[in-house]
Image (cartoon, rainbow, N blue to C red):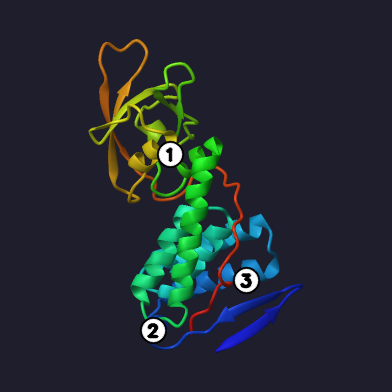
Amino acid sequence: MNIKLALGLTVWLTLVSGAWGADIPEEARRHSVRGRTALEMGQSMGAYREARLEFAKAVELAPNWADAHYNLAHVQAKLGDLNGAIASYSRYLELAPRAPDAQKVRDEIVKLEYQKERLERESPFLRHQAMLTEGGIGAGIKLDAESGAPRLALIAAGSPAEQAGLQAGDRLLAVDGKATTGLREDEIIKLVRGEPGTAVRLSIQRDGWDRPREFSVPRLRAPVGRFLMSPPLADPPRAGQ
């Protein structure tokens, strides 16, 4: 059943029933309502960032609440966090595989994956941005103009890369034992990125070192830095019962 709320613009919120809305902690519902209210009050980037914080808290408190993941995916996509949106939509499908909109969400994931692949292929800077989202390490990668060797770039403050001691300009020789020689930037980034919270092993050579050193770097669980994309959304957030 759909209800329509208006506050300068039209927002559709879907009420779901059955197991998806059952046994949800009251505090999780509270954060979900706060997130939807942030969107009702304005569709600015600031409003989407506030909503993301609320929906992320709802997911933390009710990790098996399908609609909480859907809502989080919605705002992650709007903020340009393509990897986060893909992960959240995928989790929604895991929890609600027979949802009426399951195929529509699967199609949305395909769209987001295509946008991500195209951006990473066509824009070096946005390839760096991909390393600032969930699954990245908070550092970009750039091929040296003279040697063609991949080097770390754009180390984000407070990121796992910085905390591990990596520095901009470090040469990246291998990722989990796979040599980076001859690989494109997007191919190397795909090797470095992975499941949020897991660690990736990097072989690093720095000027002044007599031999490479190994670094184990945890992948981001939450994005760092700014996001430049605002891709289209599937549907606005939904409310639980």
Image marks 2 and 1: residues in contact by CB distance under 8 Å? no
Identify the mark at residue 226; answer none if there is no mark. none
Disc 3 or 2, which lies upstream in sequence? 2
Name the front one of labels 1 and 3.
1
Q: Which residue is mark 3?
A: 37
Q: CA distance from mark 2 to mark 1?
A: 42 Å
* 117 or 73, nearer to the observer: 117
Q: Which mark is residue 22?
A: 2
Q: Element at badge 1? A: helix
Q: Amino acid at mark 1?
A: Asp
Residue pictured at 46% horizontal, 62% vertical? 110
The residue carrying pointer 2 sits among few (fewer than 14), some (14 to 19) or many (20 or more) residues within 10 Å by Cα, namely few
Question: Real-space Cα distance between discs 1 and 3?
Answer: 38 Å
Amino acid under disc 3 = Thr
Check disc 1 and report the residue beneath it.
Answer: 186
Mark 2 and mark 3 in contact (Cβ < 8 Å)? no
Residue 111 visible in the current orientation: yes
Residue 155 is situated, as x and y percent measured from the top left of the image, at 47, 31
In the figure, 184 relative to 54: above or below?
above
98 or 166: nearer the eye?
98
Q: Which residue lies at the image location 38% right of the left edge and 39% below the top edge?
A: 187
Q: Is residue 119 above or below residue 25?
A: above
Of the numbered discs 1 and 3, the one sitting upstream in the chain is 3
| Along the viewing direction, whichever of 132 and 123 lies nearer the viewer | 123
Neighbourhood count class around disc 3 (C-alpha, 10 Å): few under 14, some 14–19, many 20 upward? some
Can see residue 129? no
